[in-house]
Amino acid sequence: MLRKALTPGKVHPTRDNVYIDTSFFIATQTANHPRHSRAVAILESCKKWRLFFSLLTIDEIMYTLLQFNLSRNRINTIIRDKILSIHNVHLITYPPDLKSIEKYLTIWGMTGLAPRDALHLYLMRTKKIQYLATFDLDFKRNQHKLGISVL
């Protein structure tokens, strides 16, 4: 029932779109991260895919990098060099209608995900993105129920 409610009608996700989550991006940029090698390998395998970020993800990345005591200039450089300058990066924008809040609340209420994770899932749905690059265990454990595939 939940999967049906979350799966958009008559929509076929394309296999070459992937939503990039904060945990995954941080792992690609942190050489001593325990999942660094895996993240880099996944990113390499998605080289021809369209990589989607949202402003929420960018915000989370910036906040996380601040926790590593990086300067604002260094964080700006990382965002510009590692995200904005990549040819296959796309930004998901928020739908401008109030119905989007209802859809987001429905996903949040039905999935049990944290509010930010539910917002990530909602944004994926707006662009029909099935693939999620993340190390977030809530997504990994519930990927079938959520109708997504975690890379």
Image (cartoon, grey):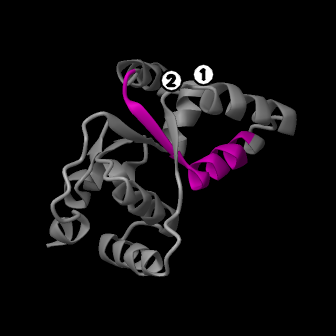
Tell me: residue 17, above or below residue 57.
above
Q: Residue 27: x and y, percent? A: 54, 30
- Picture residue at 30% right of the left edge, 75% below the top: 110
Residue 49 — which label? none
Q: Is residue 4 left or right of residue 96?
A: left
SS for dot 1: loop
Q: Residue 66: x and y, percent? A: 77, 43
> According to the image, label 2 marks what residue?
36
Most extreme residue toward the front, as rendered? 96
Which corner quadrant of the image does residue 126 belong to?
Answer: bottom left
The residue stretch that appears in magenta: 48-65
Q: Name the chief secondary structure element in magenta.
A: helix
- Picture residue at 49% right of the left edge, 67% below the top: 95
Quadrant position of the C terminus in the picture: top left
* Residue 133 seen in render: no
Quadrant position of the N terminus in the picture: bottom left
As for residue 50 lying within the magenta part, the answer is yes
Q: Residue 44: x and y, percent? A: 41, 18
In front here: 115 or 58?
Answer: 58
- Picture residue at 46% right of the left edge, 67% below the top: 114
> According to the image, label 1 marks what residue?
32
Q: Are marks 1 and 2 in contact (CB under 8 Å)?
A: yes
Q: Amino acid at mark 2?
A: His
SS for dot 2: helix
